Image: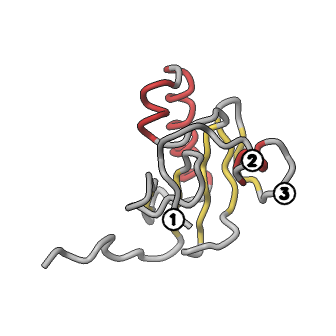
């Protein structure tokens, strides 16, 4: 069910619970600023989620309020995860949904890293 990208942070969202260790995850990477883990409902042979450790709902929230160190650390983690997964040469897709129209499902900023096969066009052309 889609959620809004704005509003107060929900400390009980699934990613907050994963960060606290209440829900297990198959971790790929973790550092001071981020956590990356395999998606439980993969949409490609490789489908990993990268989340910041701070309480951020969306890119707008994160980019406006996170420290420069948090922003740099998170962005570096996304690139590191793609390299660790061996996706740089064949290619990969990054996706971040924000809000209702984009079908954001968890009210915590996250980036999907897709790879492992040709992914095709992202959206159908507008007629």
Task: Say which quarter of the image contains residue 48.
Answer: bottom right
| Marks 2,3: beta carbons within 8 A | no
Q: Is label 3 in a helix, a strand or a loop? A: loop
Tell me residue 35's x, y (percent): 68, 44
At 46% from the left edge and 63% from the top edge, which residue is drawn?
A: 103
Query: In the rendered view of the protein, which quadrant contains the N terminus?
Result: bottom right
At 59% from the left edge and 66% from the top edge, which residue is drawn?
A: 47
- Crowding around mark 1 (Cα neighbors within 10 Å: few <14, some 14 to 19, many 20+) is many
Q: Counting residues from the N terminus, which is met first, the one under dot 2 or under dot 1?
A: 2
Real-space Cα separation, disc 3 to disc 1, in angstroms: 21 Å
Where does label 1 land, which residue? 114
Taking the image as shown, residue 23 lies to the left or right of residue 110, namely right
Mark sitting on residue 24: 3
Q: Counting residues from the N terminus, which is met first, the one under dot 2 or under dot 3?
A: 2
Tell me residue 92's x, y (percent): 45, 62
Q: Is residue 68 above or below residue 117?
A: above
Q: Is label 2 in a helix, a strand or a loop? A: loop
Real-space Cα separation, disc 2 to disc 1, in angstroms: 26 Å
Look at discs 3 and 1 and give the one toward the viewer: 3
Residue 7 or 17: which is nearer the viewer?
7
Taking the image as shown, residue 33 lies to the left or right of residue 62, namely right
Q: Is label 1 in a helix, a strand or a loop? A: strand
At 65% from the left edge and 73% from the top edge, which residue is drawn?
A: 41
């Amino acid at each position: 069910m889609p959620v809004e990208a704005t509003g107060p942070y929900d400390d009980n969202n699934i990613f907050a619970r994963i960060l606290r260790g209440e829900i297990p995850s198959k971790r790929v990477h973790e550092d001071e600023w981020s956590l990356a883990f395999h998606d439980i409902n993969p949409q490609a042979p490789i489908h990993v989620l990268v989340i910041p450790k701070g309480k951020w709902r969306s890119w707008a929230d994160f980019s406006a309020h996170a420290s420069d160190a948090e922003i740099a650390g998170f962005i570096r983690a996304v690139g590191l995860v793609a390299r660790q997964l061996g996706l740089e040469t064949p290619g990969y897709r990054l996706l971040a949904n924000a809000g209702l129209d984009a079908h954001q499902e968890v009210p915590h900023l996250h980036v999907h890293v897709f790879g492992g096969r040709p992914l095709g066009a992202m959206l159908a052309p507008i007629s």
